[in-house]
Image (cartoon, rainbow, N blue to C red):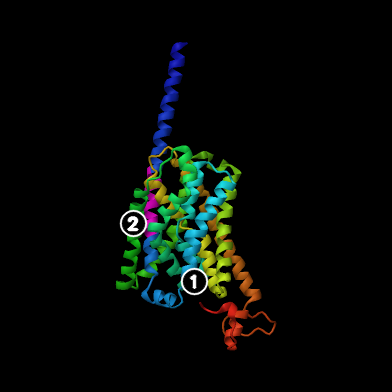
């Protein structure tokens, strides 16, 4: 009998060891996939930036300034507030702060293009916010995470995060050099980067479900927080742009940039800085759920914008006798001063 029990125990131990080794392998694969795909994403981001884009935006910098305020003041505050309201576990709350403090990504520029926004502003906002994240992301984590780190004894490696961000920014500079020296190659790199962005979220979701089968049965509060954060970003971005009297294209662009975060960057930071932490799997859960909801919501919002433009606004240069003109464009065409759309 003892032999049977001993044999059974040996089988269980062997199975457990095999599962642990299997999960470790998947973790390493996931880490490499995230880092490689993120490098393509950041390279593509640099390939769409031109000096002329900056000149155009900096002539009227208010839109970019509003975007930075939304990205690094409103979004981290919204993440902090939602995490408390939903009473999320420390690991979930910290990862939500990382996502909320991350800059925009290539998906927001694609969203802006498809949703008839100001693509030039979107590209410049994404580039500036990515650079600003070097300081603002660690600062927001330090500012807001103490609600959870002090009570649980969890430490956040700020220096590792800063170093990782610097390394992540390097491909953006390389992309700008490619755009400058080899402009014909830049569009190809941009397409690869856009596909990589969607691929990163998809592959990461599949691998994380294999590593952590309980991911899909996460508490409803986590799913609600993942749904509400981008919704808050879209609403707050549009509202602030409206209050600062931006034109409708700029309002839409700032809204997209605020609500659509660079999930790949957040996942890479967690992989690099928390890879050996016992909270690692829990930290990956929120960005994974957020990424899927964000992509679906982003394209859903684009669809609503396209429908809205088709039935309620007009293409530039065309008249609409049914009264579907955009009031901002119409007043500018007629030379009438409209304080609601005046550039600041």
Q: Quadrant of residue 185?
A: bottom left
> Which residues lie in the magenta part?
28-40
Identify the residue shown where x is 42% and y is 75%.
Answer: 58
How busy is the neighbourhood of tag 2: few (under 14 within 10 Å), some, or many (20 plus)?
Answer: some
Q: Which residue is at the front of the view, 152 or 178?
A: 152
Q: Residue at x 46, y 19 (%)?
A: 8
Question: Which label lies toward us, 1 or 2?
Answer: 1
Let me know if residue 33 is in the magenta part. Answer: yes
Residue at far top of view? 1
Which secondary structure, mark 1? Answer: helix
Disc 2 is placed on an element classified as helix
Q: In the rendered structure, which disc, 1 or 2, sits on the residue that comes first in sequence?
A: 1
Q: Position of residue 33 (x, y in %)?
A: 39, 50
Label 2 belongs to which residue? 166
Left or right of residue 229, residue 39 in this image? left
Residue 60, image x, y percentages: 46, 77
Point 46% across, 49% down: residue: 204
Residue that badge 1 annotates:
63
Q: How many marks?
A: 2
């Amino acid at each position: 009998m003892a032999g049977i029990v001993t044999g059974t125990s040996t089988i269980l131990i062997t199975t457990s060891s095999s599962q642990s080794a299997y999960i470790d392998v998947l973790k390493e694969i996931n880490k490499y996939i995230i880092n490689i795909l993120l490098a393509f994403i950041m390279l593509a981001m640099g390939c769409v930036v031109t000096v002329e884009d900056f000149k155009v935006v900096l002539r009227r910098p208010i839109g970019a300034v509003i975007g930075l305020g939304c990205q690094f003041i409103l979004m981290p505050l919204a993440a902090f507030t939602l995490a408390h309201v939903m009473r999320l576990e420390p690991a979930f709350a910290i990862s939500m702060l990382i996502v909320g403090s991350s800059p925009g990504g290539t998906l927001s520029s694609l969203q802006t293009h498809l949703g008839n926004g100001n693509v030039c502003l979107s590209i410049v906002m994404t580039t500036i916010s990515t650079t600003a994240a070097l300081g603002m992301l660690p600062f927001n984590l330090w500012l807001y995470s103490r609600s959870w780190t002090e009570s649980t004894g969890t430490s956040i490696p700020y220096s590792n995060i800063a170093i990782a961000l610097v390394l992540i920014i390097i491909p953006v500079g390389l992309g700008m050099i490619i755009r400058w020296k080899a402009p014909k190659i830049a569009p190809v790199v941009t397409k690869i980067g856009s596909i990589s962005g969607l691929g990163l979220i998809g592959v990461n979701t599949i691998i994380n479900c294999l590593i952590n089968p309980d991911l899909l049965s996460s508490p409803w509060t986590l799913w609600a927080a993942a749904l509400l954060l981008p919704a808050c970003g879209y609403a707050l971005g549009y509202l602030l742009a409206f209050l600062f009297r931006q034109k409708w294209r700029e309002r839409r662009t700032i809204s997209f940039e605020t609500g659509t975060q660079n999930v790949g960057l957040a996942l890479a930071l967690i992989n690099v800085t928390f890879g050996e932490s016992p909270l690692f799997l829990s930290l990956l859960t929120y960005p994974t759920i957020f990424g899927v909801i964000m992509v679906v919501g982003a394209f859903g919002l684009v669809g609503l914008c396209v429908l809205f433009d088709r039935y309620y606004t007009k293409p530039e240069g065309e008249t609409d006798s049914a009264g579907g003109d955009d009031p901002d464009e119409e007043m500018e065409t007629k030379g009438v001063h409209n304080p609601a759309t005046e550039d600041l």
